[in-house]
């Protein structure tokens, strides 16, 4: 508005109005986002909207992904369906769903909403296959 005031608008708009408008809008966005987060958490806790189904794909051990699992549980918006790993490891109550070759079957059977890929040493072909399967479904 300020830069186009003589080309588009025929009235002068003070810079202070633009600055105040920016701060009022920023404050409004913060308030609306906080309200929406509160509503979403309330609906999730009451079971009105379902938690998103999450699949973990990794080849790390339990100690290396413990903090990530803790953050997922604290978010309280995900239901961890299971994890894909070359070998079975002890991850609390999370079921083991096999290796990377089972990803397509898991995605089809469990109707996964989101995938968390934790940095691992999968080959380029395995990574491409994982990406391709998740993109298709």
Image (cartoon, rainbow, N blue to C red):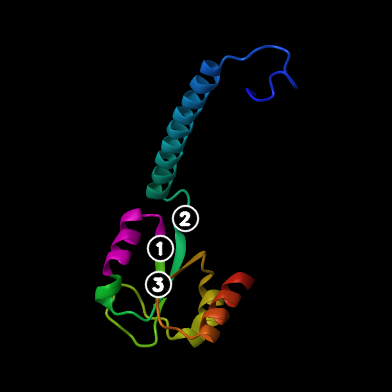
Q: Which residues are magenta?
A: 66-78
Question: In the image, what residue occupies the spot 48% across and 33% down?
Answer: 29
Residue 13 falls within the magenta-colored stretch:
no
Q: Position of residue 112 (x, y in %)?
A: 51, 68
Name the element at disc 1: strand
Which secondary structure class fits the magenta region best? Answer: helix
Q: In the image, what residue occupies the spot 51% across and 16% down?
A: 16
**Proximity of marks 3 and 2: CB atoms separated by less than 8 Å:** no
Residue 9 vertical placement versus 76 (above, below):
above
Snapshot quadrant of residue 125: bottom right
Residue behind mark 2: 50
Q: What residue did someone put label 3 on?
A: 118
Query: Which of the two discs, 3 and 2, sits closer to the camera?
Result: 3
In space, the residues marked 1 and 2 are separated at their CA atoms by 9 Å
User: Can the viewer see residue 137 in this picture?
Assistant: no
- Figure check: 16 above or below 126: above
**Quarter of the image where the N terminus is located:** top right
Task: Return the mark for residue 79.
Answer: 1
Quarter of the figure with residue 72: bottom left
């Amino acid at each position: 508005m300020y830069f186009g005031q003589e080309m588009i608008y025929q009235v002068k708009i003070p810079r202070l109005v633009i600055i105040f408008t920016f701060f009022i809008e920023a404050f409004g966005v913060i308030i609306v986002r906080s309200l929406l987060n509160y509503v979403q958490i309330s609906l999730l806790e009451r079971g009105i909207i379902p938690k998103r189904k999450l699949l973990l794909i990794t080849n790390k051990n339990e100690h290396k992904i413990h903090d990530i699992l803790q953050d997922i549980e604290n978010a309280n918006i995900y239901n961890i369906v299971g994890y894909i790993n070359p070998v079975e490891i002890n991850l609390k109550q999370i079921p083991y769903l096999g290796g990377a070759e089972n990803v397509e079957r898991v995605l089809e059977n469990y109707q996964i909403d989101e995938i968390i890929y934790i940095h691992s040493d999968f080959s380029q072909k395995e990574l491409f296959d994982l990406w391709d399967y998740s993109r298709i479904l």
